Amino acid sequence: MPIKGLDQAIRKMKELERAVAALDGDITSVSFDPNDPQSIELAIQQMETAIDERVGSYSKNDMVEGVVVELKERYRQAILDRAAAGRAAEESGS
């Protein structure tokens, strides 16, 4: 007796595997002015767009979507942290 939904689960897992492979390595490089909120936001948008472009064909897969949301948040926070560190370095005269 076949298990209901197994084919769909297998398809989603294979798509997740391909999406993760597409996200492996350097995704993009961004630069920004740590004192310019608009510049920081543009860098975040550039990063998110690059991720979306890599996994676009799998975007309807809820497993892939979960990975993408987490990755975007992690990179967003990294950009914000780098901006804060840049401002702190300027304030301390480094």
Image (cartoon, helix red, strand yellow):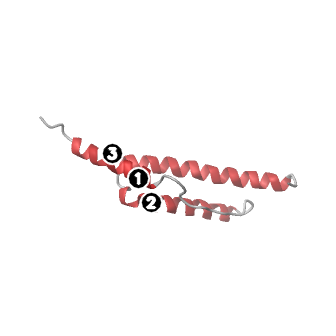
What numbered label is drawn on residue 54? 2
The answer to which image quadrant residue 90 occupies is bottom right
Residue name at image x 38 percent, y 52 percent: 18
The answer to which image quadrant residue 53 occupies is bottom left
Label 2 packing within 10 angstroms: few (<14), some (14-19), many (20+): some
Looking at this rendering, what residue extends furthest in the right direction? 93
Where residue 25 appears, as percent x and y from the top left, is: 52, 53
Q: CA distance from mark 1 to mark 2?
A: 7 Å
Residue corresponding to mark 3: 13
Label whose residue precedes the other's in the sequence (1 or 2)? 1
- In this rendering, the answer to whether 55 lies above or below 64 is below
- In this rendering, the answer to whether 82 lies above or below 46 is above
Q: Secondary structure at mark 3?
A: helix
Q: Secondary structure at mark 1?
A: helix
Q: Amino acid at mark 3?
A: Met
Looking at this rendering, what residue extends furthest in the top direction? 1
Where residue 16 appears, as percent x and y from the top left, is: 37, 48
Q: Secondary structure at mark 2?
A: helix
Residue corresponding to mark 1: 19
Label 3 packing within 10 angstroms: few (<14), some (14-19), many (20+): some
Label whose residue precedes the other's in the sequence (1 or 3)? 3
Label whose residue precedes the other's in the sequence (2 or 3)? 3
Q: Amino acid at mark 2?
A: Arg
In contact (CB < 8 Å): disc 1 and disc 2: yes
Label 1 packing within 10 angstroms: few (<14), some (14-19), many (20+): many
Quadrant placement of the C terminus: bottom right
Q: CA distance from mark 2 to mark 3?
A: 17 Å
Residue 40 left/right relative to 22: right
- In this rendering, the answer to whether 57 lies above or below 64 is below
Where residue 2 appears, as percent x and y from the top left, is: 14, 37
Where residue 21 appears, as percent x and y from the top left, is: 43, 51
